[in-house]
Image (cartoon, rainbow, N blue to C red):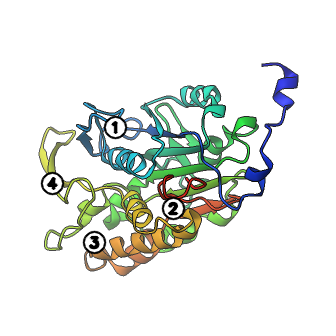
Amino acid sequence: MSENENRDIRTIPDKDFKSETYIIRKPVLVTFIAQDHPIGTTNNSKLKSMVVDKNSKLVNREVDIDMKLLDEFFREQLTIQPQVEFLVNHKHDEIHEYMKAIEAEKYDGFFFVFLSYLSLKERNKKGELPCLKVECYDKAVPIENFMGMVKERRHMALKPKVFIFQADDLDLMQPNIIKKAFGFGETVELKTMTIPTDADQLMMLSTLPQRLPTLRPETNVAIPTASEGGGVVDQPSDVSEKVTVRKENSLLIKALVDVLKANRDVDILSCTPLINGKVEKLIDALGLADEYGKDFVKNKLVLPVVYSTLTKDLHFYNVRDNPNGL
């Protein structure tokens, strides 16, 4: 690509530019970037389920249950079937090369779904993290690095770019040894986190582990799930023992799907408080306060972070309902 071509500005029709909603005429690209297990261990590996839907690009693959649920959701909600791509256990440079190779002119919207783990190596003695890093196969990378990969892509200009980070904080899986001083939600300086200021981006980040429901006392009623019906699965541990694990979706992913399905006429950004409210209800339903203390629930189980520079309304109702919506 020539230097002059790099400087070209994508031509945007006047009607599209003035529209209060994003105009979606071409397919949306949905990219799943998944890490099956934390770097260096198979403990707390992602829960998986076999995809049997022949209409899915994931058919006959055993994938992260969050990926399966979201794949079903995207294909169900969009009349123009999305282009679905998945990168599982890829190194940072491989992900970067994929992002650079996206033929952005073919799509009118982009969803990048990261199903991975929060890096804990930089956490200091007080439990503070200087920045939030998400694990790739070879190393952990600040979330703004991923969002920065779409910068200066002229064919992505004025198109919605949604980043969903399900980054499991595995420290929360050991609540009995976490110091009850300042909570995780109070010590991580989310307000001063460096994030690109490029337009037309929406980011949601949850650090609540996918396996958080496994901490729920056995006497509690199971949370109903959208894809697995609140079932259980036997998972071998590193010492070849059998343990019973509840096979439930991450709280953010379940809440996002449930809320957007129930509010198809509402702008996605306007739905984010509802999504957080749903996550809060799901946390309460786990009944962890009596087992691990109110401090753990209130201060450490923080709600998803939302960041947006979207310049228009982004709707998730079917295109046939409104040809100008997503």
Furthest toward the top, the residue is 2
Estimate how packed mark 2 is, as few (under 14), some (14 to 19) or many (20 or more) residues with alpha carbons within 10 Å: some
Q: Are marks 2 and 3 in contact (CB under 8 Å)?
A: no
Left or right side of 156 for 30: left
Pick whichever of labels 1 and 2 is earlier in the sequence.
Answer: 1
Of tags 2 and 4, which is closer to the observer? 4
Q: Looking at this view, is 301 or 182 the one in front? A: 301
Residue receiving disc 4: 232
Question: Label 3's element?
Answer: helix
Percent from the top left, x then y, of residue 179? 42, 69
Of tags 4 and 1, which is closer to the observer? 4
Above or below, 251 relative to 52:
below
Above or below, 187 relative to 111:
below
For marks 3 and 4, give the CA distance: 16 Å
Of tags 1 and 2, which is closer to the observer? 1
Q: Looking at this view, is 23 or 160 the one in front? A: 23
Residue receiving disc 3: 286
For marks 4 and 1, give the CA distance: 22 Å
Of tags 3 and 1, which is closer to the observer? 3
Q: Looking at this view, is 169 or 275 the one in front? A: 275
Q: Which amino acid type corresponds to the residue marked 1 in the rendered image?
A: Thr
Of tags 2 and 3, which is closer to the observer? 3
Residue receiving disc 2: 127
Estimate how packed mark 1 is, as few (under 14), some (14 to 19) or many (20 or more) residues with alpha carbons within 10 Å: few
Percent from the top left, x then y, of residue 19? 72, 58
